[in-house]
Amino acid sequence: MKSLFKQIVKNTIYILGIIPANVYLVWEKLQRIYLNERTSKKFRFCGYGLSLTPPLFLMNKHYMQIGNNFFSQPGLRMECIVEYNNIKYNPLLVIGNNVSINFYCHIGCLNKIYIGDNVMIGSHVLIEDHSHGTIQEIETPVAKRNLHSKGPIIIEDNVWIGENVCILENVTIGRCSIIGANAVVTHNIPPYSVAVGAPAKVVKSIH
């Protein structure tokens, strides 16, 4: 409630012109610098050049390792799940250097997610290495099923992931590949490939 009130006051001040626009923008810039400085100290490791844009949600940051020059647009949600239904997990989320993430992406890690260097991720992308339950739990209410991971997600260097893509558990996307918009990646994608569709299939080699 306090944060909402502060935002309303700031916007009102800006609209009424009580504070010149350039001063307001400097204030916003200083807030972002403070956010990034404070957040970078809570990761397991964080390189230089961190640039996070609020609003964002980060859960269990000490299980995340962030490389140099990481940039995200507003709406990023990154979660490392360490306990669910009284079962403990040991997740690891590793992001390489020069990675950029567009608006409103969700990365959920129960096992391991590795994102290599120079990866570009479009808006509204889901990357999740686990699921609710197994076939044996199909009669159990979804919220009460245990979380399971069939294997890690590995996204190698120089991969471009388009808008609205879903990348699911136990998948490797090879280096220099392109995943087209709205694809659902359920199987490995070889290096230097263009993959589209649901489920994603390789339609072109770019090697």
Image (cartoon, rainbow, N blue to C red):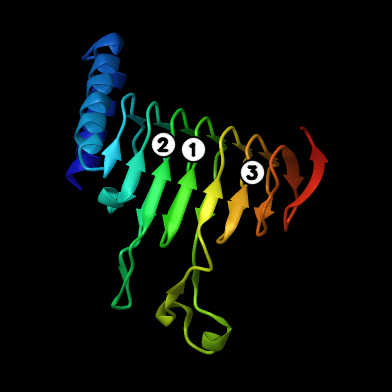
Q: Give the quadrant of residue 21.
A: top left
Q: Residues within 10 Å of mark 1 (few under 14, many from 20)?
A: some
- Taking the spot 61% from the left edge, 46% from the top edge, the residue there is 164
**Amino acid beneath label 2:** Pro
Looking at the rendered structure, the secondary structure element under dot 2 is: loop
Q: Mark 3 = which residue?
A: 174
Q: Nearer the viewer, mark 3 or mark 2?
A: 3
Circle 2 residue: 74
Q: Given the image, on which type of amino acid does mark 1 rest?
A: Phe
First in sequence, mark 1 or 2: give its number: 2
Residue situated furthest left in the rendering: 2
Q: Can you tell which mark lies on residue 93?
A: none
Q: Is residue 158 above or below residue 163?
A: above
Mark 3 against mark 1, which lies toward the viewer? Answer: 3
Name above or below for residue 2 compared with residue 25: below
Mark 3 or mark 2, which has the lower sequence index? 2
Instruction: Say if mark 1 contacts mark 2, CB within 8 Å.
Output: yes
Asked whether residue 109 appears in the rendered view, the answer is yes
